[in-house]
Amino acid sequence: MKGIILCLFFTVFFIAARSQEIGFNTTDIGGEFQWYNKGAVFNLQLAFNAKIHHSFLLRAGYNNAKLQRTTTHDSEEGGGFGGGLGYRYYFKPFPYKFFIGTRVDLWKMDITWRKTLIEGSTNLWTMQPALEAGYTVVINDNFFFTPYVAAGTQVNLKTEGEKVGSGDGFIFLPGISAGIRF
């Protein structure tokens, strides 16, 4: 009899403890815009928000390198497609308000350059690992709006052609994303 009562007690205790779990899984779909000193990035973003504190991001988009004058060329401009992965830790149990995170993006860039009477093209594989911090606002549990800043480094993994100014170094990426949460 004591065994049955003990088993019943643990069953009720387990059910009560399990029902106290907070959080819910959501998915975000939206657009993202990032600015940096050498151009702008336009992404489609998909985020999988775990029950408590965590969010995993997938991004795909276009990196537009604006027209610039460098020490090696009179002008350089171009762009390319790519994408990235990211992780965010929200300080609230739910995926909104303040967060910190990490991200890594990979781009296949085609940069057209001009130097006096010579024109050419350079293909780059560029990686941008960064840390980020931001704030997510959720409206009516259906829409999200997220301003953030990211800072990291840009690393050229492979260069086919003449070296260009879109090279290695520190990169600061303020951005904003918005979309639908379901």
Image: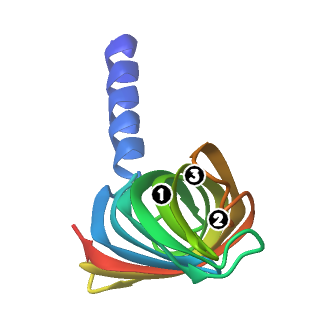
Quarter of the rendering occupied by the N terminus: top left
Residues marked 2 and 1 touching at CB (< 8 Å): yes
Distance (Cα) linking label 2 and label 1: 10 Å
Pointer 2 and pointer 3: residues touching (CB < 8 Å)?
A: yes
Q: Earlier in the sequence, mark 2 or mark 1?
A: 1
Say which mark, if any, is on residue 166.
2
Which residue: 78% across, 73% down? 71
Q: Residues within 10 Å of mark 3 (few under 14, many from 20)?
A: many
Q: Which residue is mark 3?
A: 126
Instruction: Answer yes or no: is residue 148 visible.
Output: no
What kind of element bears circle 2? loop
In the rendered structure, which amino acid carries the disc numbered 2? Answer: Ser
In this rendering, which labeled residue sits more in front, label 1 or label 3? 1
Local secondary structure at mark 1:
strand
How far from the left and from the top, in percent, is residue 159?
60, 45
| Type of amino acid at the residue the image marks with label 1 | Met
Its colouring scheme is rainbow
Callout 1 touching callout 3 (CB < 8 Å): yes
The one of 134 and 165 positioned closer to us in this rendering: 165
Measured as percent of width and height from the top left, residue 39 is found at 54, 78
Q: Which badge, 2 or 3, comes first in the chain's sequence?
A: 3
Q: In the rendered structure, which amino acid carries the disc numbered 3?
A: Thr
Regarding mark 3 in the picture, which secondary structure is present there? strand
> Which mark, by number, is residue 83?
none
| Residue at far front of view | 117
Q: Position of residue 40 (x, y in %)?
A: 50, 78
Upstream in the sequence, badge 1 or badge 3? 1
Residue drawn at x 30%, y 65% as measured from the top left? 28
Residue at image mark 1:
109
Whole-number angstrom distance, CA of label 2 to CA of label 3: 9 Å
The answer to whether one can see residue 109 in this image is yes
